[in-house]
């Protein structure tokens, strides 16, 4: 990580203060109307002015989901005229210093070239496999029949050539038929479909703008490609390319697995009762593994290779990665073999599945975990500095009532979990005649928050640079239990795997313990060294397996090897009972019996009894002795939960019942410790991520996920003297925080974090001449006002006739008190209001840290001092630093406040018109109630100029 840079913290500080364009967000630019060269150029200039680093050209095909988007683009997608406009956009972006990412489809899901892949090629259409019982005496020789299976009374399955060749004792005859879909979406398990897709899209981009590949055009974005069908229901995934893949998985006739793939309604009997649990589990897992591999190689890796050959980064995401059941329902079956296989793994943060105050999933960790499984430098193309990306398409379908406070919270949640690029969705080319609704995601002109994106983009860029320039430090891997979903989809066993997976993640988060998510292929190829399981890019001393009844045999053997080498393995609730393949079953049973003989079951009651029996003494291997001397002296055994010595050993097999999971996180924090910085007290709403820069240089992200102010007491524990700095990602400013000078003692610091606030702390060796402990600053209010000198309406954002309009009209407001807009005669107003103030500052105060406190803002403010932009105040506590812009004597202060479009969306006549004209699509209906959260507007103050005087 250090390379030639002798001062990684210094390098990061420069990237933080002035983030490079590559870290600035790119915005999805939705082409959804009649396109014009001049308007394309003008919109790029508008996007550049708001501090974005680039765009993803997102063509909405002329026939794409017209019920939701009203109309598509013109000229037609993939026409020569379309590619000419792409060239226009790329050339103008190059002149402006913007990047252009190419979206590979005319809408979504990717892979069809808006139906052209299957045009004239019905053999490439997507398909599923269906099942129907064959009544006695009826034939099953239709052209669509793929196989006929006979199920005996004993539950044995045999593929037969016809119903005339049934074995004795046949109880059920099943015909499996291919169903072909003629809706324009291809069979992406067929390699020919992938090649045809590349020829229709990627190759044509290369012919038109290929000279910009690897520079202005860093890469391609693929979106939600999928296969049809699921397991345990009425339709299973199918492709003519699958039989060859299935034949590679074992000696059994793959056709004998087919009855295991379906549910009782399709089969006419319960497969678990008739065929046996082991047969169903192993049949489904073998089949789903074949589907995942075929999909990965035919589509995802094929597109990867094309991008590598052309110097491009391949990124994108699947849909539904936030819920394990949707990994099967969503049609991608295995995340690490799809979006996780991309050069830049990505996730999709839409529908508000991440929001403050609700139960949130740790799915953003998937992206970083996929990178950490690879060798450093394994990500392709020419510019390695831009290759290690983890991308989140964020804010789509959050509704027009979403605020920057919410956007910031969502971004912070993801940065702490390893995302290093947050790409907003979207900037609509047109918001006219119903198109303002669409996915309820337009962030550009007409949205009152659009003028305030400059500061937020700098914020996102700084945090992206911090995460991208640092390495993820963790000792723990949590297993990705997709096999349980394959085997038991829709049953309680699958629900338990998903539930305990989430609980494992949450208990580790609450204990401030970093971890990765790892899948079976990653663990199976890992090797063991010095008590750790080592993947190509990371090592783990502890692996946690959620309640997963089925697991691949090689994974279980790796876990045994980890234990035997001195590592720790934790099983939640139960050990797996089944291998994913029949040949591995005996070996898995043997491995499970061995590990079970070593297992210690966590049980708080019995462990406390053991503690009491020992007279309350700190036994060897207990909490205190698990810590280094400094931490033990600081914290002591009295403040800890009680754990048995067996639970704290590094070489251990633990079984954690579900109710013990909260203790498990705490136990691992004792056994493994933290990286330099650790909380003194339990802080359930703190999310902390420690990341390494060099052996003795660290960066720590601390995020207050909760809804109230958090006071965090932290301990710095290091054998080397350290200097601590605090960096503010909104202003880009940094300040010295503390010195850690006594290696045998800890250094305590206290931080206050506002709700949703994220701060960055760095620790580096204490050099000669490093600043001393900063003096406590006295907060001196130089001016406080609840009255502006004058107030003007600058622009009004109107939603009318399904169109967004901006009316720019400077008009004064009577009265200048800092009150809600509704009390100023602006009830229902959406837009920008400008407040003017005069500030008189004595020269003596200019040497101090001066900042503006705006009090309460609904919902974003941009601050200008003497005609220069000072920054954006986007969430509480609404502060902006001013000292570099103020001058002695009189200063002109302008605060421009914007609210949201919520009030316009909820206007009675707009709601009625949306219903009458069928603009109230599913996105609209889902977001409508959310708009009631942000109906206000105004600068409520008080506005204060504050000096921090040491």
Image (cartoon, rainbow, N blue to C red):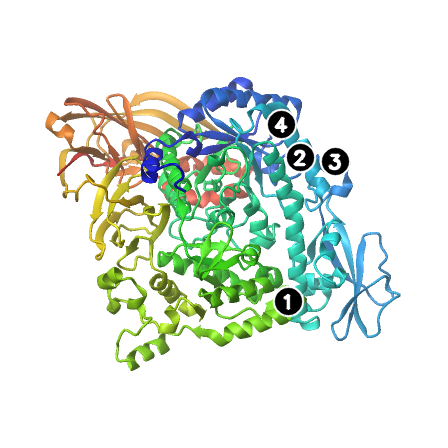
Q: Residue 539, relative to residue 469: is it above or below? A: below
Query: Which residue does the image show at 60% across and 61% down from the upper left?
Result: 489
Label ID, residue 938: none
- Please rate how many residues cluster around mark 1, counting C-alpha atoms within 10 Å: few if below 14, some from 14 to 19, many from 20: some
Q: Position of residue 616 (x, y in %)?
A: 26, 77
Residue in the image at 34% along x and 38% along y:
6
Horizontally, residue 602 falls left or right of residue 802, namely left
* Image depth: mark 1 or mark 2 in front: 1
Q: Tag 4, which secondary structure?
A: helix
Density class for disc 4 (Cα within 10 Å; few <14, some 14-19, many ≥20) is few
C-alpha separation, residue under disc 3 versus residue under disc 1: 44 Å
As drawn, the label of residue 198 is 2
Give whichever of discs 4 and 3 has the lower sequence position.
Answer: 3
Q: Are marks 1 and 2 in contact (CB under 8 Å)?
A: no
Q: Nearer the viewer, residue 200 or 371?
A: 371
Residue position for label 1 = 584
Residue 228 seen in this snapshot: no
Read off the residue under disc 4: 206
Q: CA distance from mark 1 to mark 2?
A: 39 Å
Q: Quadrant of the C terminus?
A: top left
> Real-space Cα distance between discs 4 and 3?
22 Å
């Amino acid at each position: 990580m250090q390379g030639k840079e002798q001062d990684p913290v210094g390098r990061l500080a420069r990237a933080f203060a002035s983030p490079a364009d590559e870290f600035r967000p790119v915005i999805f630019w939705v082409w959804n109307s009649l396109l014009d060269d001049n308007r394309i150029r003008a919109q790029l200039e508008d996007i550049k002015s708001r501090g974005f680093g680039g765009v993803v050209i997102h063509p909405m095909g002329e026939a794409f989901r017209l019920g939701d988007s009203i109309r598509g683009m013109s000229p037609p997608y993939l026409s020569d005229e379309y590619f000419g406009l792409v060239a226009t956009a790329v050339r103008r972006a190059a002149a402006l210093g913007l990047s252009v990412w190419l979206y590979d489809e005319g809408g979504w899901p990717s892979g069809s070239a808006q139906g052209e892949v299957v045009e004239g090629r019905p053999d490439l259409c997507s398909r599923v496999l269906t099942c129907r019982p064959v009544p006695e005496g009826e034939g099953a020789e239709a052209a669509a029949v793929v196989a006929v299976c006979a199920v005996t009374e004993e539950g044995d399955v045999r593929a037969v050539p016809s119903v005339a060749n049934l074995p004795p004792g046949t109880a059920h005859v099943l015909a499996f038929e291919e169903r072909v879909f003629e809706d324009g979406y291809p069979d992406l398990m067929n390699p020919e479909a992938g090649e045809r897709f590349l020829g229709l899209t990627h190759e044509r981009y290369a012919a038109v703008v290929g000279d910009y590949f690897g520079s202005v055009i860093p890469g391609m974005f693929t979106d939600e490609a999928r296969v049809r069908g699921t397991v345990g229901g009425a339709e299973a995934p199918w492709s003519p390319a699958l039989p060859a893949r299935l034949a590679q998985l074992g000696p059994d006739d793959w056709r004998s697995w087919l009855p295991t793939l379906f549910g009782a309604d399709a089969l006419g009997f319960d497969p678990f009762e008739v065929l046996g649990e082991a047969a169903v589990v192993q049949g489904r897992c073998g089949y789903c593994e074949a589907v995942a591999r075929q999909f990965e190689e035919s589509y995802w890796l094929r597109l990867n290779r094309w991008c590598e050959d052309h110097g491009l980064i391949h990124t994108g995401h699947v849909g539904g990665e936030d819920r394990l059941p949707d990994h099967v329902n969503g049609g991608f079956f295995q995340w690490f073999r799809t979006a996780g296989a991309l050069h830049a793994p990505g996730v999709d943060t839409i529908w508000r599945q991440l929001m403050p105050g609700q139960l949130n999933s740790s799915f953003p960790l998937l992206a970083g975990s996929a990178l950490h499984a690879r060798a450093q430098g394994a990500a392709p193309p020419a510019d390695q500095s831009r290759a290690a990306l983890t991308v989140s398409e964020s804010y789509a379908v959050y509704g027009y009532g979403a605020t920057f406070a919410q956007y910031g919270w969502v971004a912070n949640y993801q940065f702490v979990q390893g995302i290093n690029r947050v790409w907003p969705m979207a900037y609509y080319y047109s918001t006219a005649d119903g198109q303002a609704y669409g996915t309820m995601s337009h962030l550009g002109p007409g949205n009152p928050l659009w003028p305030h994106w400059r500061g937020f983009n700098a914020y996102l860029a700084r945090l992206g640079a911090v995460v991208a320039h640092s390495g993820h430090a963790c000792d723990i891997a949590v297993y990705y239990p997709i096999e349980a979903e394959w085997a038991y989809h829709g049953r309680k066993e699958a629900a338990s795997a998903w539930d305990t997976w989430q609980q494992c993640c949450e208990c580790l988060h609450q204990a401030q313990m970093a971890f990765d998510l790892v899948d079976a292929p990653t663990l199976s190829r890992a090797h063991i060294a010095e008590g750790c399981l080592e993947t190509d890019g990371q090592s783990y001393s502890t692996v946690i397996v959620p309640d997963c009844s089925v697991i691949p045999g090689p994974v279980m053997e790796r876990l045994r090897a980890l234990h035997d080498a001195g590592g720790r393995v934790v099983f939640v609730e139960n050990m797996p009972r089944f291998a994913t393949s029949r040949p591995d079953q005996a070996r898995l049973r043997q491995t499970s019996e061995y590990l079970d003989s070593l297992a210690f079951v966590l049980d708080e009651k019995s462990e406390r009894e053991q503690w009491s029996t020992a007279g309350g003494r700190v036994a060897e291997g207990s909490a205190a002795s698990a810590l280094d001397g400094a931490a033990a002296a600081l914290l002591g055994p009295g403040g800890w939960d009680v754990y048995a010595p067996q639970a704290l050993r590094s070489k251990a097999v633990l079984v954690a019942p579900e109710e013990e999971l909260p203790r498990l996180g705490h136990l691992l924090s004792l056994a493994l410790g933290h990286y330099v910085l650790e909380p003194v007290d339990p802080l359930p709403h703190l999310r902390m991520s420690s990341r390494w820069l060099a052996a003795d240089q660290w960066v720590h992200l601390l995020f207050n996920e909760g809804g109230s102010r958090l006071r965090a007491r932290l301990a710095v524990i290091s054998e080397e003297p350290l200097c601590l700095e605090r960096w503010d990602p909104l202003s880009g400013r940094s300040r010295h925080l503390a010195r850690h000078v006594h290696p045998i003692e800890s250094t305590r610091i206290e931080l206050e974090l506002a709700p949703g606030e994220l701060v960055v702390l760095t620790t580096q060796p204490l050099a000669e001449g490093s600043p001393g402990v900063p003096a406590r600053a006295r907060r001196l209010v130089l001016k406080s006002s609840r009255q502006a000198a004058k107030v003007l309406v600058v622009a009004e954002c109107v939603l009318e006739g399904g169109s967004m309009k901006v009316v720019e009209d400077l008009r004064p407001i009577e009265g200048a008190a800092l009150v809600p807009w509704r009390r100023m005669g602006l009830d229902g107003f959406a837009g920008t209001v400008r407040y003017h103030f005069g500030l008189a500052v004595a020269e003596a105060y200019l040497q101090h840290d001066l900042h503006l406190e705006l009090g309460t803002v609904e919902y974003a403010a941009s601050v200008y001092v003497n005609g220069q932009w000072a920054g954006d105040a986007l969430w509480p506590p609404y502060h902006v630093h001013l000292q570099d812009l103020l001058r002695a004597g009189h200063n002109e202060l302008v605060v421009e406040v914007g609210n949201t479009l919520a009030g316009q969306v909820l206007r009675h006549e707009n709601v009625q018109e949306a219903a009458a004209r069928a603009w109230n699509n599913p996105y609209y209906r889902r977001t409508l109630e959310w708009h009631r959260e942000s109906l206000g507007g105004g600068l409520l103050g008080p506005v204060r100029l504050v000096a921090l005087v040491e």
